[in-house]
Image: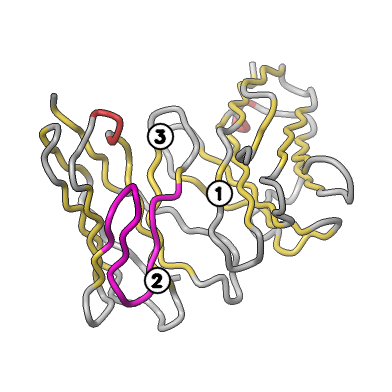
Amino acid sequence: DAKTTQPNSMESNEEEPVHLPCNHSTISGTDYIHWYRQLPSQGPEYVIHGLTSNVNNRMASLAIAEDRKSSTLILHRATLRDAAVYYCIPYSGAGSYQLTFGKGTKLSVIP
Amino acid sequence: NAGVMQNPRHLVRRRGQEARLRCSPMKGHSHVYWYRQLPEEGLKFMVYLQKENIIDESGMPKERFSAEFPKEGPSILRIQQVVRGDSAAYFCASSPDPVGTQYFGPGTRLTVL
């Protein structure tokens, strides 16, 4: 499995943009970069995923470095509901079907 | 389209009893995954099942734990003779295919007294 490195914690003011970085320098060519988040006392929630190109959906944007060794999850306007632990997970499903959750980044949103 | 459903949401058992956790995948999903989150730890993969088949159980403890996903009905994670160390949140996820995005349920929080 590709190893990931994320900051332990980050803070953001409400309604400000948030950039959550992730390093995955050992990612394989077939791994998609998945992002999940886990709100307190809830199950992980899928946020977004991508392979090479930047991706947007209603929740967030994903910016992927050209060499694919890092990516950044962008929340355009943080709300209190975005306070959660965010995980970046390289995953292809090829040969292993398990998502490997690291420690993630705990995002605090300040009103 | 209902999401992944798990029940019960909370389960209390005494040491030595059995715990049965149920997971109903999203409609159209035939792939189910179970994960466990011990207190203050990250989620760990336990087992991956397709209908009637266990595909990967590399994360399952060797004893007391079993899982099934019958042709009809929900997937069941069964823990026999529970011990205090089994206290954790158990999450189920489902996907439409083996490489598809996994969508998680709200979890079952097991407390062993």
Dot 1 or dot 3: first in sequence order is 3
- Is residue A60 within the magenta segment? yes
Left or right of A76? Residue B53 is: right
Which span is picked out in magenta?
A46-62
Same chain for marks 1 and 3?
yes
Q: Is residue B47 above or below residue B100?
A: above
Tell me residue B70's x, y (percent).
87, 48
Report, in whole angstroms, how far the alpha carbon at label 2 lies from the one at label 1.
21 Å
Amino acid type, label 2: Ala
Where disc 2 sits, the SS reads: loop
**Tag nearer the camera, 3 or 2:** 2
Name the residue at 23% across, 39% down: A107
Badge 3: residue crowd in 10 Å (few <14, some 14–19, many ≥20): few
Name the residue at 72% across, 21% down: B15
Name the residue at 72% across, 17% down: B14
Reading the image, the residue beneath label 1 is B103
Amino acid type, label 3: Glu
Render colour scheme:
secondary structure
Reading the image, the residue beneath label 3 is B40
Name the residue at 66% across, 33% down: B6
Left or right of B79? Residue A107 is: left
Contact (Cβ within 8 Å) of mark 1 with mark 3 = no
The label number, if any, that marks residue A2 in the structure image: 2
- Is residue A109 within the magenta segment? no
Q: Chain of mark 3?
A: B
